Image (cartoon, rainbow, N blue to C red):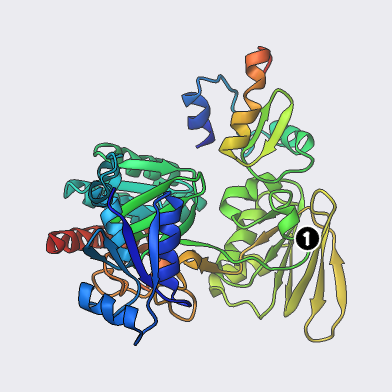
Protein backbone atom coordinates (compact mmCIF):
# COMPACT_ATOMS: atom_id res chain seq x y z
CA UNK A 1 0.00 0.00 0.00
CA UNK A 2 1.29 3.46 -0.90
CA UNK A 3 2.15 5.60 2.09
CA UNK A 4 0.70 9.00 2.85
CA UNK A 5 2.82 11.93 3.91
CA UNK A 6 1.36 15.11 5.35
CA UNK A 7 3.31 18.32 5.63
CA UNK A 8 1.63 20.19 8.46
CA UNK A 9 2.25 22.64 11.22
CA UNK A 10 0.71 23.46 14.56
CA UNK A 11 -2.32 25.72 14.70
CA UNK A 12 -3.33 25.01 11.12
CA UNK A 13 -7.02 23.99 11.16
CA UNK A 14 -7.03 22.22 7.79
CA UNK A 15 -3.92 20.22 8.80
CA UNK A 16 -5.86 18.96 11.82
CA UNK A 17 -8.90 18.22 9.65
CA UNK A 18 -6.80 16.27 7.13
CA UNK A 19 -5.20 14.22 9.89
CA UNK A 20 -8.47 13.36 11.60
CA UNK A 21 -10.03 12.60 8.19
CA UNK A 22 -7.37 9.92 7.60
CA UNK A 23 -7.39 8.70 11.20
CA UNK A 24 -11.20 8.22 11.07
CA UNK A 25 -10.71 5.96 8.07
CA UNK A 26 -7.91 4.01 9.71
CA UNK A 27 -5.38 5.19 7.13
CA UNK A 28 -1.82 5.56 8.45
CA UNK A 29 0.23 8.58 7.50
CA UNK A 30 3.61 10.11 8.15
CA UNK A 31 3.57 13.64 9.43
CA UNK A 32 6.29 16.16 8.68
CA UNK A 33 6.36 19.39 10.67
CA UNK A 34 6.78 22.13 8.06
CA UNK A 35 6.69 25.51 9.73
CA UNK A 36 6.80 28.18 6.99
CA UNK A 37 10.42 29.06 6.24
CA UNK A 38 11.80 25.80 7.69
CA UNK A 39 13.83 23.33 5.65
CA UNK A 40 10.94 20.86 5.61
CA UNK A 41 8.67 23.62 4.26
CA UNK A 42 11.20 24.42 1.52
CA UNK A 43 11.38 20.73 0.64
CA UNK A 44 7.55 20.61 0.53
CA UNK A 45 7.45 23.62 -1.77
CA UNK A 46 9.98 22.03 -4.10
CA UNK A 47 8.10 18.70 -4.21
CA UNK A 48 4.53 19.94 -4.44
CA UNK A 49 4.91 23.36 -6.01
CA UNK A 50 2.70 24.78 -3.27
CA UNK A 51 3.56 26.73 -0.15
CA UNK A 52 0.23 26.38 1.65
CA UNK A 53 -0.34 23.91 4.44
CA UNK A 54 -1.20 21.10 4.63
CA UNK A 55 0.23 19.35 1.57
CA UNK A 56 -0.54 15.69 1.17
CA UNK A 57 1.47 13.15 -0.81
CA UNK A 58 0.42 9.64 -1.69
CA UNK A 59 3.66 7.80 -2.36
CA UNK A 60 5.60 10.46 -4.28
CA UNK A 61 2.56 12.03 -5.84
CA UNK A 62 1.28 15.36 -4.44
CA UNK A 63 -2.51 15.43 -4.17
CA UNK A 64 -2.99 18.89 -2.66
CA UNK A 65 -4.62 20.01 0.58
CA UNK A 66 -7.52 18.90 2.78
CA UNK A 67 -10.34 19.64 0.34
CA UNK A 68 -8.48 17.79 -2.42
CA UNK A 69 -8.21 14.84 -0.09
CA UNK A 70 -11.98 14.91 0.50
CA UNK A 71 -12.54 15.18 -3.26
CA UNK A 72 -10.42 12.19 -4.17
CA UNK A 73 -12.03 10.13 -1.44
CA UNK A 74 -15.45 10.98 -2.82
CA UNK A 75 -14.54 9.93 -6.33
CA UNK A 76 -12.89 6.70 -5.17
CA UNK A 77 -9.48 7.87 -6.36
CA UNK A 78 -8.01 7.79 -2.85
CA UNK A 79 -8.66 4.09 -2.36
CA UNK A 80 -7.42 3.42 -5.87
CA UNK A 81 -4.16 5.27 -5.24
CA UNK A 82 -3.73 3.48 -1.93
CA UNK A 83 -4.45 0.14 -3.57
CA UNK A 84 -7.46 -0.43 -1.29
CA UNK A 85 -10.61 -2.25 -2.31
CA UNK A 86 -13.20 0.00 -3.93
CA UNK A 87 -16.00 0.59 -1.46
CA UNK A 88 -18.18 2.21 -4.03
CA UNK A 89 -18.03 5.83 -2.91
CA UNK A 90 -18.48 6.96 -6.49
CA UNK A 91 -22.10 5.84 -6.57
CA UNK A 92 -22.93 7.77 -3.41
CA UNK A 93 -21.61 11.07 -4.75
CA UNK A 94 -24.58 13.28 -5.52
CA UNK A 95 -24.57 16.08 -8.03
CA UNK A 96 -26.93 18.07 -5.82
CA UNK A 97 -27.97 17.75 -2.21
CA UNK A 98 -30.95 19.94 -1.38
CA UNK A 99 -31.53 20.70 2.27
CA UNK A 100 -35.16 21.58 2.89
CA UNK A 101 -38.46 20.20 1.60
CA UNK A 102 -40.59 23.32 1.25
CA UNK A 103 -41.62 24.89 -2.07
CA UNK A 104 -38.06 26.13 -2.73
CA UNK A 105 -36.40 22.77 -2.05
CA UNK A 106 -38.98 20.70 -3.94
CA UNK A 107 -38.94 23.01 -6.94
CA UNK A 108 -35.13 22.77 -6.95
CA UNK A 109 -35.46 18.96 -6.85
CA UNK A 110 -37.69 18.93 -9.93
CA UNK A 111 -35.40 21.21 -11.92
CA UNK A 112 -32.29 19.29 -10.85
CA UNK A 113 -33.83 15.91 -11.72
CA UNK A 114 -34.97 17.21 -15.12
CA UNK A 115 -31.34 18.16 -15.80
CA UNK A 116 -30.47 14.52 -15.03
CA UNK A 117 -28.51 15.48 -11.94
CA UNK A 118 -28.20 12.84 -9.24
CA UNK A 119 -30.30 14.52 -6.57
CA UNK A 120 -30.97 14.03 -2.87
CA UNK A 121 -33.45 15.97 -0.74
CA UNK A 122 -32.85 16.01 3.01
CA UNK A 123 -35.64 17.52 5.09
CA UNK A 124 -37.38 17.34 8.43
CA UNK A 125 -40.71 17.53 6.66
CA UNK A 126 -42.41 18.03 3.32
CA UNK A 127 -44.09 21.37 2.71
CA UNK A 128 -42.14 23.52 5.14
CA UNK A 129 -43.86 26.67 6.34
CA UNK A 130 -46.72 26.38 3.83
CA UNK A 131 -47.99 23.53 5.99
CA UNK A 132 -48.70 26.09 8.70
CA UNK A 133 -51.55 27.63 6.71
CA UNK A 134 -54.95 26.18 5.80
CA UNK A 135 -55.17 27.30 2.23
CA UNK A 136 -53.28 29.12 -0.47
CA UNK A 137 -55.07 31.62 -2.72
CA UNK A 138 -52.23 33.18 -4.67
CA UNK A 139 -50.26 30.37 -6.31
CA UNK A 140 -50.46 30.50 -10.09
CA UNK A 141 -53.13 28.16 -11.39
CA UNK A 142 -54.87 27.78 -8.02
CA UNK A 143 -57.35 30.47 -7.00
CA UNK A 144 -58.01 28.52 -3.82
CA UNK A 145 -56.38 25.29 -2.74
CA UNK A 146 -56.11 23.42 0.55
CA UNK A 147 -52.51 23.51 1.69
CA UNK A 148 -52.45 19.76 2.22
CA UNK A 149 -53.60 19.23 -1.38
CA UNK A 150 -51.03 21.67 -2.74
CA UNK A 151 -48.21 19.97 -0.83
CA UNK A 152 -49.46 16.56 -2.03
CA UNK A 153 -49.29 17.91 -5.60
CA UNK A 154 -45.72 19.15 -5.06
CA UNK A 155 -44.77 15.74 -3.69
CA UNK A 156 -46.48 13.89 -6.52
CA UNK A 157 -44.60 16.06 -9.01
CA UNK A 158 -41.24 15.23 -7.39
CA UNK A 159 -42.20 11.52 -7.35
CA UNK A 160 -42.30 11.55 -11.17
CA UNK A 161 -38.53 11.88 -11.23
CA UNK A 162 -35.65 9.93 -9.78
CA UNK A 163 -34.93 11.91 -6.65
CA UNK A 164 -33.52 10.29 -3.51
CA UNK A 165 -35.13 11.51 -0.32
CA UNK A 166 -34.24 11.45 3.32
CA UNK A 167 -37.28 12.87 5.09
CA UNK A 168 -37.80 13.21 8.82
CA UNK A 169 -34.13 13.79 9.55
CA UNK A 170 -32.22 16.91 10.48
CA UNK A 171 -28.78 18.01 9.35
CA UNK A 172 -26.14 17.83 12.06
CA UNK A 173 -23.24 19.34 10.19
CA UNK A 174 -22.35 20.53 6.77
CA UNK A 175 -18.96 21.18 5.21
CA UNK A 176 -19.28 23.49 2.27
CA UNK A 177 -15.85 24.90 1.57
CA UNK A 178 -14.30 21.96 -0.29
CA UNK A 179 -14.98 21.04 -3.87
CA UNK A 180 -17.02 18.12 -2.55
CA UNK A 181 -19.63 19.05 0.06
CA UNK A 182 -20.21 16.74 3.01
CA UNK A 183 -23.51 16.64 4.89
CA UNK A 184 -24.05 14.62 8.06
CA UNK A 185 -27.62 13.95 9.14
CA UNK A 186 -29.22 13.28 12.52
CA UNK A 187 -29.56 9.56 11.70
CA UNK A 188 -25.77 9.33 11.54
CA UNK A 189 -25.49 9.12 7.75
CA UNK A 190 -23.05 11.12 5.70
CA UNK A 191 -23.63 12.33 2.14
CA UNK A 192 -21.23 13.74 -0.43
CA UNK A 193 -22.21 16.12 -3.19
CA UNK A 194 -20.72 18.33 -5.86
CA UNK A 195 -23.20 21.09 -5.03
CA UNK A 196 -25.47 21.97 -2.12
CA UNK A 197 -28.68 23.93 -2.21
CA UNK A 198 -29.76 25.40 1.13
CA UNK A 199 -33.54 25.78 1.26
CA UNK A 200 -34.12 25.49 4.98
CA UNK A 201 -36.75 28.24 5.34
CA UNK A 202 -37.68 29.95 8.56
CA UNK A 203 -38.93 28.99 12.01
CA UNK A 204 -40.99 30.87 14.59
CA UNK A 205 -39.11 33.18 16.92
CA UNK A 206 -39.49 32.03 20.54
CA UNK A 207 -40.25 34.35 23.48
CA UNK A 208 -37.30 32.97 25.46
CA UNK A 209 -39.10 33.15 28.79
CA UNK A 210 -39.16 30.58 31.61
CA UNK A 211 -41.72 27.81 31.09
CA UNK A 212 -41.85 28.22 27.33
CA UNK A 213 -39.63 25.36 26.18
CA UNK A 214 -40.97 23.00 28.82
CA UNK A 215 -44.60 23.49 27.80
CA UNK A 216 -44.35 23.35 24.00
CA UNK A 217 -47.26 21.21 22.83
CA UNK A 218 -48.82 21.43 26.28
CA UNK A 219 -50.42 24.79 25.58
CA UNK A 220 -47.50 26.66 24.02
CA UNK A 221 -47.67 26.79 20.24
CA UNK A 222 -46.20 28.79 17.39
CA UNK A 223 -48.75 27.96 14.74
CA UNK A 224 -52.22 29.40 15.18
CA UNK A 225 -53.51 28.04 11.91
CA UNK A 226 -52.46 24.52 12.89
CA UNK A 227 -53.51 24.60 16.50
CA UNK A 228 -56.21 27.26 17.05
CA UNK A 229 -59.05 24.68 16.74
CA UNK A 230 -57.50 22.71 19.61
CA UNK A 231 -58.10 25.66 21.95
CA UNK A 232 -61.90 25.31 21.73
CA UNK A 233 -63.64 26.67 24.86
CA UNK A 234 -60.36 27.58 26.58
CA UNK A 235 -58.84 30.89 27.66
CA UNK A 236 -55.88 31.65 25.44
CA UNK A 237 -53.19 34.33 25.15
CA UNK A 238 -51.56 35.49 21.92
CA UNK A 239 -48.09 37.05 22.04
CA UNK A 240 -47.36 39.65 19.37
CA UNK A 241 -48.81 42.75 17.79
CA UNK A 242 -48.36 42.28 14.04
CA UNK A 243 -50.55 40.77 11.33
CA UNK A 244 -49.78 37.14 12.26
CA UNK A 245 -50.70 37.80 15.89
CA UNK A 246 -53.91 39.58 14.87
CA UNK A 247 -54.81 36.70 12.55
CA UNK A 248 -54.19 34.26 15.40
CA UNK A 249 -56.56 36.25 17.60
CA UNK A 250 -59.18 36.23 14.83
CA UNK A 251 -58.80 32.44 14.43
CA UNK A 252 -59.23 32.03 18.19
CA UNK A 253 -62.23 34.38 18.44
CA UNK A 254 -64.24 31.71 16.61
CA UNK A 255 -63.44 28.90 19.06
CA UNK A 256 -61.86 30.04 22.33
CA UNK A 257 -63.65 31.35 25.44
CA UNK A 258 -61.51 34.46 26.05
CA UNK A 259 -58.50 35.74 24.14
CA UNK A 260 -55.81 37.98 25.63
CA UNK A 261 -53.51 39.70 23.18
CA UNK A 262 -50.17 40.75 24.67
CA UNK A 263 -47.84 42.97 22.66
CA UNK A 264 -44.53 44.58 23.57
CA UNK A 265 -45.38 47.54 21.30
CA UNK A 266 -48.60 49.24 20.21
CA UNK A 267 -50.36 47.04 17.62
CA UNK A 268 -48.56 47.23 14.28
CA UNK A 269 -50.78 45.03 12.10
CA UNK A 270 -53.24 46.20 9.42
CA UNK A 271 -56.02 48.50 10.65
CA UNK A 272 -58.70 46.25 9.18
CA UNK A 273 -57.48 43.34 11.34
CA UNK A 274 -57.07 45.57 14.40
CA UNK A 275 -60.69 46.74 14.07
CA UNK A 276 -61.95 43.15 14.01
CA UNK A 277 -59.98 42.27 17.13
CA UNK A 278 -60.72 45.39 19.16
CA UNK A 279 -64.44 45.13 18.37
CA UNK A 280 -64.75 41.62 19.80
CA UNK A 281 -66.17 41.24 23.34
CA UNK A 282 -64.09 38.06 23.74
CA UNK A 283 -60.76 39.87 23.31
CA UNK A 284 -58.76 41.94 25.77
CA UNK A 285 -55.65 43.68 24.40
CA UNK A 286 -52.58 44.48 26.50
CA UNK A 287 -50.18 46.69 24.54
CA UNK A 288 -46.73 47.65 25.83
CA UNK A 289 -46.71 44.63 28.09
CA UNK A 290 -43.87 42.17 28.41
CA UNK A 291 -44.42 38.44 29.03
CA UNK A 292 -42.32 37.44 32.04
CA UNK A 293 -43.04 33.73 32.26
CA UNK A 294 -45.38 30.95 31.32
CA UNK A 295 -46.77 29.19 34.38
CA UNK A 296 -47.75 25.53 34.66
CA UNK A 297 -46.37 22.18 35.80
CA UNK A 298 -47.27 19.77 33.03
CA UNK A 299 -49.56 22.05 30.99
CA UNK A 300 -50.02 25.82 30.65
CA UNK A 301 -52.00 27.32 33.54
CA UNK A 302 -51.28 31.00 33.06
CA UNK A 303 -48.85 33.73 32.06
CA UNK A 304 -47.32 36.62 33.96
CA UNK A 305 -47.12 39.94 32.19
CA UNK A 306 -45.55 43.25 33.16
CA UNK A 307 -46.59 46.72 32.04
CA UNK A 308 -43.68 48.57 30.45
CA UNK A 309 -45.25 51.87 31.52
CA UNK A 310 -46.10 51.22 35.17
CA UNK A 311 -44.13 48.08 36.02
CA UNK A 312 -47.32 46.48 37.29
CA UNK A 313 -47.29 42.66 37.09
CA UNK A 314 -50.49 40.77 36.25
CA UNK A 315 -51.31 37.11 35.97
CA UNK A 316 -53.65 35.91 33.25
CA UNK A 317 -55.17 32.47 33.74
CA UNK A 318 -54.93 30.79 30.33
CA UNK A 319 -54.59 27.20 29.20
CA UNK A 320 -52.73 28.12 26.06
CA UNK A 321 -50.48 30.70 24.45
CA UNK A 322 -49.85 31.21 20.77
CA UNK A 323 -46.55 32.93 20.05
CA UNK A 324 -46.59 35.04 16.88
CA UNK A 325 -43.62 37.38 17.20
CA UNK A 326 -41.95 36.84 13.87
CA UNK A 327 -39.70 34.31 12.19
CA UNK A 328 -36.02 33.44 12.25
CA UNK A 329 -34.12 32.03 9.26
CA UNK A 330 -32.82 28.47 9.65
CA UNK A 331 -29.29 29.48 8.80
CA UNK A 332 -27.57 28.51 12.05
CA UNK A 333 -25.55 25.64 10.57
CA UNK A 334 -24.06 27.81 7.81
CA UNK A 335 -23.77 31.11 9.66
CA UNK A 336 -19.98 30.74 10.08
CA UNK A 337 -19.44 29.80 6.45
CA UNK A 338 -21.87 31.86 4.39
CA UNK A 339 -22.54 35.57 4.31
CA UNK A 340 -25.75 36.51 6.08
CA UNK A 341 -27.55 39.83 6.54
CA UNK A 342 -28.40 41.55 9.83
CA UNK A 343 -31.35 39.23 10.45
CA UNK A 344 -29.45 36.04 9.61
CA UNK A 345 -30.76 35.51 6.09
CA UNK A 346 -28.26 34.02 3.62
CA UNK A 347 -27.15 36.65 1.12
CA UNK A 348 -27.50 35.41 -2.48
CA UNK A 349 -26.99 37.00 -5.88
CA UNK A 350 -29.51 36.91 -8.73
CA UNK A 351 -28.39 33.34 -9.53
CA UNK A 352 -28.85 32.07 -5.96
CA UNK A 353 -25.09 31.88 -5.47
CA UNK A 354 -23.82 32.29 -1.92
CA UNK A 355 -20.23 33.30 -2.51
CA UNK A 356 -18.88 29.78 -1.86
CA UNK A 357 -18.50 27.86 -5.10
CA UNK A 358 -20.99 25.07 -5.54
CA UNK A 359 -23.22 26.32 -2.71
CA UNK A 360 -26.58 27.84 -3.56
CA UNK A 361 -29.51 28.99 -1.44
CA UNK A 362 -33.15 29.72 -2.16
CA UNK A 363 -36.48 30.45 -0.53
CA UNK A 364 -37.23 32.09 2.81
CA UNK A 365 -33.81 31.41 4.32
CA UNK A 366 -32.29 33.89 1.84
CA UNK A 367 -32.37 37.69 1.73
CA UNK A 368 -34.59 37.59 -1.38
CA UNK A 369 -37.58 39.81 -0.53
CA UNK A 370 -41.24 38.73 -0.41
CA UNK A 371 -41.64 35.42 1.35
CA UNK A 372 -44.25 33.81 -0.86
CA UNK A 373 -44.76 30.23 -2.11
CA UNK A 374 -44.49 31.32 -5.72
CA UNK A 375 -41.30 33.31 -5.08
CA UNK A 376 -39.74 30.37 -3.22
CA UNK A 377 -40.66 27.96 -6.03
CA UNK A 378 -39.12 30.29 -8.61
CA UNK A 379 -35.97 30.74 -6.55
CA UNK A 380 -35.70 26.95 -6.13
CA UNK A 381 -35.80 26.53 -9.90
CA UNK A 382 -33.08 29.17 -10.29
CA UNK A 383 -30.87 27.54 -7.66
CA UNK A 384 -31.07 24.15 -9.41
CA UNK A 385 -30.33 25.64 -12.82
CA UNK A 386 -27.36 27.52 -11.34
CA UNK A 387 -26.12 24.30 -9.75
CA UNK A 388 -26.43 22.62 -13.17
CA UNK A 389 -24.45 25.43 -14.85
CA UNK A 390 -21.79 25.13 -12.17
CA UNK A 391 -21.46 21.35 -12.64
CA UNK A 392 -21.24 21.70 -16.45
CA UNK A 393 -18.50 24.31 -16.09
CA UNK A 394 -16.54 22.08 -13.74
CA UNK A 395 -16.34 19.26 -16.26
CA UNK B 1 -46.36 12.11 7.77
CA UNK B 2 -47.43 10.07 10.81
CA UNK B 3 -50.29 8.50 8.86
CA UNK B 4 -48.02 7.63 5.95
CA UNK B 5 -45.49 6.13 8.31
CA UNK B 6 -48.11 3.91 9.97
CA UNK B 7 -49.49 2.82 6.59
CA UNK B 8 -45.98 1.94 5.40
CA UNK B 9 -45.56 -0.16 8.52
CA UNK B 10 -48.82 -1.93 7.72
CA UNK B 11 -50.37 -0.82 10.99
CA UNK B 12 -54.13 -0.29 11.21
CA UNK B 13 -55.13 2.92 12.94
CA UNK B 14 -58.14 5.09 13.69
CA UNK B 15 -58.03 8.81 12.89
CA UNK B 16 -59.94 11.30 15.04
CA UNK B 17 -60.18 14.80 13.56
CA UNK B 18 -60.09 16.83 16.76
CA UNK B 19 -60.79 20.06 14.88
CA UNK B 20 -64.26 18.70 14.04
CA UNK B 21 -64.93 16.22 16.87
CA UNK B 22 -65.14 17.94 20.27
CA UNK B 23 -65.47 14.68 22.21
CA UNK B 24 -62.28 13.42 20.60
CA UNK B 25 -60.57 16.74 21.40
CA UNK B 26 -61.49 16.40 25.08
CA UNK B 27 -60.37 12.77 25.09
CA UNK B 28 -57.07 13.81 23.52
CA UNK B 29 -56.49 16.50 26.13
CA UNK B 30 -57.32 14.01 28.88
CA UNK B 31 -55.11 11.08 27.82
CA UNK B 32 -52.14 13.32 26.96
CA UNK B 33 -52.18 15.34 30.17
CA UNK B 34 -53.40 18.49 28.45
CA UNK B 35 -51.66 18.39 25.07
CA UNK B 36 -52.68 21.14 22.67
CA UNK B 37 -50.81 19.95 19.65
CA UNK B 38 -51.41 17.38 16.95
CA UNK B 39 -50.78 14.63 16.23
CA UNK B 40 -51.29 12.81 19.49
CA UNK B 41 -50.62 9.13 18.84
CA UNK B 42 -51.72 6.40 21.20
CA UNK B 43 -50.27 2.91 20.80
CA UNK B 44 -51.17 0.26 23.41
CA UNK B 45 -51.80 2.96 26.07
CA UNK B 46 -48.50 4.71 25.24
CA UNK B 47 -49.45 8.31 24.43
CA UNK B 48 -47.07 10.41 22.34
CA UNK B 49 -47.47 14.12 21.67
CA UNK B 50 -46.08 15.03 18.24
CA UNK B 51 -44.67 12.62 15.68
CA UNK B 52 -41.28 11.20 16.52
CA UNK B 53 -40.53 8.38 14.09
CA UNK B 54 -38.15 6.55 16.43
CA UNK B 55 -40.50 6.73 19.42
CA UNK B 56 -43.46 5.51 17.41
CA UNK B 57 -41.38 2.68 15.99
CA UNK B 58 -40.39 1.65 19.50
CA UNK B 59 -43.98 1.89 20.75
CA UNK B 60 -45.20 -0.25 17.84
CA UNK B 61 -43.21 -3.20 19.18
CA UNK B 62 -46.03 -3.87 21.64
CA UNK B 63 -48.19 -4.85 18.67
CA UNK B 64 -46.00 -7.88 18.07
CA UNK B 65 -46.84 -9.14 21.52
CA UNK B 66 -50.51 -8.31 21.64
CA UNK B 67 -53.24 -7.65 19.14
CA UNK B 68 -54.92 -4.96 21.18
CA UNK B 69 -54.56 -1.44 19.82
| Residue at image location 59% in from the left, 55% down from the top | A223
**In the image, residue A79 lies at what x, y percent?**
28, 47
SS at mark 1? loop
Horizontal relation, residue A333 to residue A370: left or right = right
Image position of A40 with respect to A278: above or below: below
Pick the front one: B9 or A229: B9
Question: Which residue does the numbered mark 1 point to in the structure image?
Answer: A211
Name which quarter of the figure residue A340 lies in. Answer: bottom left
**In the image, residue A305 lies at what x, y percent?**
80, 72
Pick the front one: A34 or A16: A34
The quarter in which the C terminus of chain A is drawn is: bottom left
What is the tally of numbered marks visible in this picture?
Answer: 1
Image position of A236 with respect to A287: above or below: above
Name which quarter of the figure residue A208 lies in. Answer: bottom right
**In the image, residue A113 lies at what x, y percent?**
22, 46
Horizontal relation, residue A213 to residue A313: left or right = left
Pick the front one: A202 or A51: A51
Instruction: Judge the density around disc 1: few (<14), some (14-19), many (≥20) Cα neighbours within 10 Å.
Output: some
Image position of A264 with respect to A393: above or below: below
| Residue at image location 37% in from the left, 56% down from the top | A182
Residue B14 seen anywhere in this rendered image of the structure: yes
Name which quarter of the figure residue A280 lies in. Answer: bottom right
The chain carrying label 1 is A
Residue A195 seen anywhere in this rendered image of the structure: no
Horizontal relation, residue A63 to residue A198: left or right = left
**In the image, residue A378 lies at what x, y percent?**
27, 60
Amino acid sequence: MATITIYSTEGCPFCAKAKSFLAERGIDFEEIEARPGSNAWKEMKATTGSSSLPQILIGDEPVGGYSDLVDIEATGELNQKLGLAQQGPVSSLYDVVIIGGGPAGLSAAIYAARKILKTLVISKDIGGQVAWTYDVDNYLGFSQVDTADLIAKFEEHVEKYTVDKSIGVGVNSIELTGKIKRITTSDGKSYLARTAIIATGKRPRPLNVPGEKELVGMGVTYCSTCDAPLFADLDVAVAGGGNSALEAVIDLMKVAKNVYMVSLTPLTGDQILQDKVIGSPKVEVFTEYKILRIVGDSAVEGIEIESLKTGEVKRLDVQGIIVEIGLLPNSGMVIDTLETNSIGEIVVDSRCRTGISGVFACGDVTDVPFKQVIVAAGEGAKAALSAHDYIINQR
Amino acid sequence: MAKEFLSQKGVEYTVYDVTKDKTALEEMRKISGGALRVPVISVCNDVMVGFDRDRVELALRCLDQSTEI
